[in-house]
Amino acid sequence: MKPPRKTPENLHELQEWMAAAVMRPLVRSRYIQKTWFDGKPTTQAAAKVIKPNARQKSWERLQLYNQQYWFRIRSCFEEDFPGLKSILGDKKFAALAEAYLRDCPSRSFTLRNLGQFLAGYLKKHPELMGPKSKLALDMVRLEWAQTEAFDSAKLPPVSATDLAGADPNKLRLGLQPHVQLLDLDYPLDHYAIKLGEHERMRTEAGKVFDTLARRARLRKVPLPKKEKIYLVVHRADNRLFYKRISRAGFAILKAIQKGRTLSQACAAADKLLRQETNDPAKTLHDWFSLWASLEWFTPAVH
Amino acid sequence: MPANRFNGFTNLGIGIGLRIPHYQHILSKKPTVDWFEIISENYMVDGGRPLEVLDDILEQYKVIQHGVSMYFGSVTRADPEHLRRLKTLIKRTKTPFISDHLCWGSVDGTYTHDLLPLPYTFEAARRTAQRIKNVSDFLETPICVENVSSYAEYHLSEMTEWEFLTEVVERADCGILLDVNNIFVSSKNHDFNPYDYLNNVPHHRVGQIHIAGHSKFEKYRLDTHDHPVLPPVWKLYAQAIKLCGPTSTLLEWDAHIPSFQEVHSEALKARQFAASLGEGHHETAA
């Protein structure tokens, strides 16, 4: 929010003034700042806009809204990024949360989208993550992917039978909006599951991640060592799953997501595929059968 | 009034909020409940578990939508994406009306996610009423606006809160979701008589009533929705029912949520007030 230039005289000015005051960071995470935007005492600025009562001065009443804003927004942010908090620790996480929420206040009617700009923001501000910045950024990407996978649309799927009869030179597919593709430098799927308390394994769909775990108390888990993984976060039967795929599989799904034809997508990953398997045709057949059975493909919308 | 054009001619009885900790109990035990209130924003998504649960609930129960971020009092225009998603949800739930708060919370595209008080001015009343009308026209659904708890008042105000509420709903020709707990909390925070408020709003526009628990602090009261309803609020509720007639009532319990049975039992206490009025007070739809 822009700092208010003067005492408000109409409704729009009042709302800009109040929003700036309410969203201004607290001092020591608890109290309203003593100095107003113009350098004068906050007590003076508040007194010009807010009526006092017998028990509370104007600035105290304003402070209540200031506190409620930050308590609410920080709690919501923490609920969305428990893994990031466990990597950074309480203090660093709190400082990062305040910086992000100050610089990127909500631009959406729903708090679900509060973290939508976090990955982009942290790329510009790696100092907020300290020495574990790559690991932390990977976790942010994973946790935002979970938010997207949790409630994004599931469209009518393309079946394996539909795929079998199609011309791969012409066929373009889409990916379900809930299917999130991630290339990570750390094996955060295992780490996130260890953090949670409600995980269990699923064979074909991948490893389940119950969103209830996000609210549960997190375990102390050793930080993962560097290891490149390619991960799909997706939803089946309205539960979230992680499924690791190979680098070639990732390249194919990325190309499909970009609107390439099936044959173009496979060609883009041809070299990788030959490094990964002695029988590329069978591997492709198996992958597409599995992905179709998981209902990841939709008709193209490009 | 029990059933009127502001609540889609419904008088549903005593409802409670549909909350995540109760999902499993409700879906497995299917308890008898007059109706559930949902927070619209929690279900304005494209898929997944929230909509699956909602569809299961809709098979068994009546659902009324209540919003928390329409911000009728905000000067900047409503987000078209918000309106589109809300309309989609209304088609899904077939809610006979929707409600949201008489407050503001966003400006110039930035959201505070709080229910901030409006200055009680004629300018604010005019703008707010126009926005309510526009939203109602777009959604093709009646709207009831809820009075909020507040912790600050502005020097700019030109009238009392109840005069402002009346000014807005008369201009917008919309309903009132009368939150008696909010009246009580604000009366304590701003030193007015809650019965002056209650006696001076247009009772024929009341489409629903909210009751809730709140917290007392040394210098103020906070609308926390984490307690049973306090005795003075029940007393105020009794007066509201006397003035408005037996009206659909919802108990709000949003934090430190106890068992389903405890929440429902607390809500059902409201029935005795309607019953105490006798049959003569039951009115039919106009």
Image (cartoon, coloured by chain):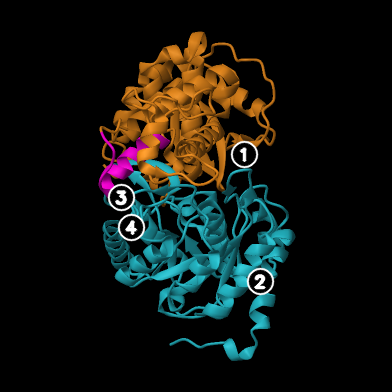
Chain colours: A orange, B cyan
Compared with A275, B99 (above or below) is below
For the residues beneath circles 3 and 2, the answer to whether they share a chain is yes
Q: Are marks 3 and 1 in contact (CB under 8 Å)?
A: no
Q: Which residue is mark 2?
A: B270
Say which mark, if any, is on residue A300: none
Sequence-first disc among 3 and 4: 3
Residue A107 percent across, percent down from the top left: 35, 39
Residue B79 circle label = 3
Q: Is residue B267 above or below residue A13?
A: below
Whether residue B75 is visible to the viewer of this picture, yes or no, is yes
Q: CA distance from mark 2 to mark 4?
A: 35 Å
Reading the image, the residue beneath label 1 is A210
- What's the mark number on residue B158? 4
Q: Quadrant of the C terminus of chain A?
A: top left
Cα separation, mark 3 vs mark 1, equals 32 Å
Q: Is residue A246 visible?
A: no
Where residue A32 sits in the image (x, y, percent)?
Answer: 47, 30
Q: Secondary structure at mark 2?
A: loop
Q: Picture coordinates of residue B173 (x, y %)? A: 33, 73
Labels 3 & 2 near each other (Cβ < 8 A)? no
Structural distance between the alpha carbons of marks 3 and 2: 37 Å
Q: Which residues lie in the magenta part?
A: A6-22
A205 vs B145: above or below: above
Q: CA distance from mark 3 to mark 4?
A: 29 Å
Same chain for labels 1 and 2? Say yes or no: no
* Magenta-colored stretch includes residue A13: yes
Amino acid type, label 1: Asp
Report the chain holding disc 3. Answer: B
Mark 3 or mark 4, whichever is nearer to me: 4
Secondary structure under badge 4? Answer: loop
